[in-house]
Image (cartoon, helix red, strand yellow):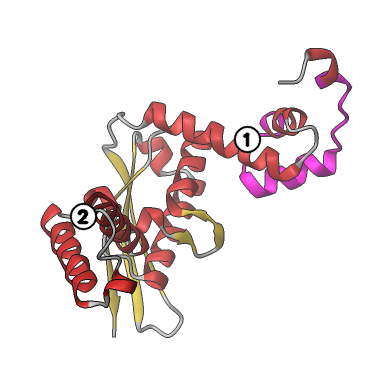
Amino acid sequence: MLNNKKMTDIKISADLVKELREKTGASIMECRSALVEAEGDLEKAVENLRKRGKEKAAKKADRATSEGVVVSYIHSNKKIGAMVELLCETDFVAKNSEFQELAYDLAMHIAATNPKHISFENVDEKEKSEYEKFTREKFASEPASSAGKNKPAELIDKIVKGKTKKHFDEISLLSQPFVKNPDTTVEDLIKEKIAKIGENIQVGNFVRFEI
């Protein structure tokens, strides 16, 4: 951690603050503070802000979300579309343009990536068990050298669970890379908005259509 004197001595340009703000959407004061803490390192400052955003989001995670919007996205070919229910705490935030833009972006993401679940935690346990069984059977059907049949049972179990988690993460909305910025996940995008807007935000139902 920098001492107060060293932090005071660090000069942060307005252009750097502006660039960080465009990347993260954080306030000018938050951007300047993060850049000072990171000693002017832009990427480190981005990570600092994301970490703070996750901490703020975690504190709001249990707050009720009884308001929100239902937003749709229709692709230009008129053959693919999606609707998403995005929830928040108050009607005031539901009417906020940035919140509604987030809902639209999520609908567009759903249309593009066709997720099957909201998150790994939302996947039915029976479906997880069936995939684990499929993965174990695949191990058993392969040659011993490639399937790792000689590995300890605990290790095989760990591999199977890891493959199961990876499979469902790839088809779950929150863990997917956001289509407009693959460097961040949908979950992290939502957490950044929670930190900025100041309310708990949750994805409700969603549906995708394709002809």
x 39%, y 43%: residue: 94
x 69%, y 38%: residue: 45
Q: Where is residue 40 in the image (x, y as percent from the top left)?
A: 80, 36
The quadrant of the rendering that contains the C terminus is bottom left
Q: In this view, does 170 lie to the left or right of 28?
A: left
Q: Which amino acid does label 2 sit on?
A: Val
Dominant secondary structure (helix, strand or loop) of the stretch shown in magenta: helix
x 79%, y 32%: residue: 39
Q: Where is residue 110 in the image (x, y as percent from the top left)?
A: 37, 66
Callout 1: 10 Å neighbours few (<14), some, many (20+)? Answer: some
Q: Does the magenta stretch include residue 115?
A: no
Q: Is residue 20 left or right of residue 112?
A: right
Residue 26 shows up from this direction: no
Vertical position of residue 38 compared to residue 133: above or below: above
Looking at the rendering, the stretch of residues picked out in magenta corresponds to 7-30
* Distance in Å between CA atoms under marks 2 and 1: 31 Å
Q: Can you name the residue that lies furthest to the front here?
A: 150
Pointer 1: what residue? Answer: 48
Q: Is residue 141 left or right of residue 16?
A: left
Q: Nearer the viewer, residue 205 or 59?
A: 59
Vertical position of residue 22 compared to residue 151: above or below: above
The quadrant of the rendering that contains the N terminus is top right
